[in-house]
Image: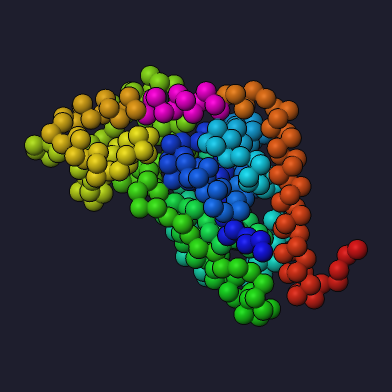
Amino acid sequence: MIVSKPVLFSAVQPSGNLTIGNYIGTMRHWSILQNNYDCFYCIADLHSLTVQKKNIDLKKSILDTLSFYLACGVDPKKSIIFIQSHVYQHTQLNWVLNCFSQFSELLRMTQFKAKRNIKNNYIKKTSVGLFNYPILMASDILLYQTNFVPVGRDQKQHIELTRDIANYFNSIYGNIFELPEPLINQYGSKIMSLLEPNKKMSKSDNNQNNVIFLLDDMNSIILKIKNAVTDSQIPAKIYYNKEQKPGISNLLEILSTVTNKEISVLSKELDGMLYSEFKNIVSDCLCKFLFKLQQSYYCYRNDESYLNKIILEGATQAQLKSQKVLSEVYYKLGLVPFF
Ligand code: TRP
């Protein structure tokens, strides 16, 4: 008997440069997860249209993002890697689910409330796409009968909404959709800004010193960590406490990821150290880590014919899988089948 593995779905938007927040919160886990789950790793290019950005070369960003997936150890032989816009089933299910989603529930989404208020160089107006964004996300997830979605804490509400939509649909048409669950780990699911450690690190931050990008050169990494906000506790002490010591806790989380050591172990090792010494260790380890990742990244990025091959294979497989669910949904809705 073949026992199938649970299905796991994850995606990242290809908007601009990826940050260590994306890596630590999401992509770091992908290579390990693909051994225990049937994984779908998607590049959510349609999601990145929800806010209009100036000077962004989307095609380049998509290939950059794909190269990072591979550099992070995602293996196209084990997992299905694809670009969202290549699998038209996503937008088709999106429409159907629009009709099964509650306006008032979407209005409650924290991310929407936060993003609609950002008026900067990029975002001038609030688009309907930004409002609908979680429904497209629900479509991504539900099309593959996903059991688990590894997400940062900020996306948890969207997974709950996905479950609500699936439940509602199932209550009318029978058990069509699996109900997905979020996979969130204890540390590192939300890396904060370096200068404002109460705010999530975001690639669209106006202040680049808040953010470490995966492609940052070593000198800027050293400088950014050096300038990162800590606290003024006397005597200075290095330990993990997100409320009282957000800056230090954030740096500890970063260090823990790049060294693969538990925070509790690190706190003992760092006990009695000055903040400046601690920062030197963080930037040293982070630089070593990112240097290796960047080398692997450029290897893939410079081979576009290999990238195109993966894109084509991934889309073909994803279309095949998702069409099954979409056809069933259309059938249940009473739409006339198209042969
Ligand atoms: N909204 C996610 C983000 O910006 C990306 C995303 C799109 C996603 N579709 C998804 C994540 C489905 C998990 C599941 O990070």
Residue drawn at x 56%, y 62% is: 147
Q: How is the image coloured?
A: rainbow
Q: How many marks?
A: 0
Q: Residue furthest toward the top? A: 219
The reply to whether residue 227 is in sight is no
List the single residue furthest toward the left: 235
Question: Which residue sits at x=70%, y=27%?
Answer: 304
Of the pair 310 and 200, the residue shown nearer to us: 310
Asked if residue 313 lies left or right of residue 104, the reply is right
Task: Return the residue nearer the eye: 283 or 102.
Answer: 283
Q: Is residue 177 visible?
A: yes
Whether the magenta-drawn stretch holds residue 291 is answered as yes
Instruction: Indicate whether 178 appears above or below 284.
Output: below
Query: Residue 85's spot in the image, x, y percent?
Result: 70, 47
Residue 287 on the magenta segment? yes
Pinpoint residue 151: horizontal percent, then vertical percent.
Answer: 48, 53
Q: Residue at x 60, y 47 (%)?
A: 41
Q: Relative to residue 333, is residue 182 depicted above or below?
A: above
Query: Which residue is the extreme one toward the front?
Result: 1
Image quarter hosting the N terminus: bottom right
Residue visible at 72% across and 57% down?
A: 321
Say which quadrant the C terminus sits in: bottom right
**Residue 51: x and y, percent?**
57, 46
Q: What x and y, as percent, mark residue 250? A: 30, 41
Classify 20 as above or below 46.
Answer: above
* Left or right of 208 in this view: 76: right
Q: Main secondary structure of the magenta part?
A: helix
Point out the stretch of residues depicted in magenta.
286-297
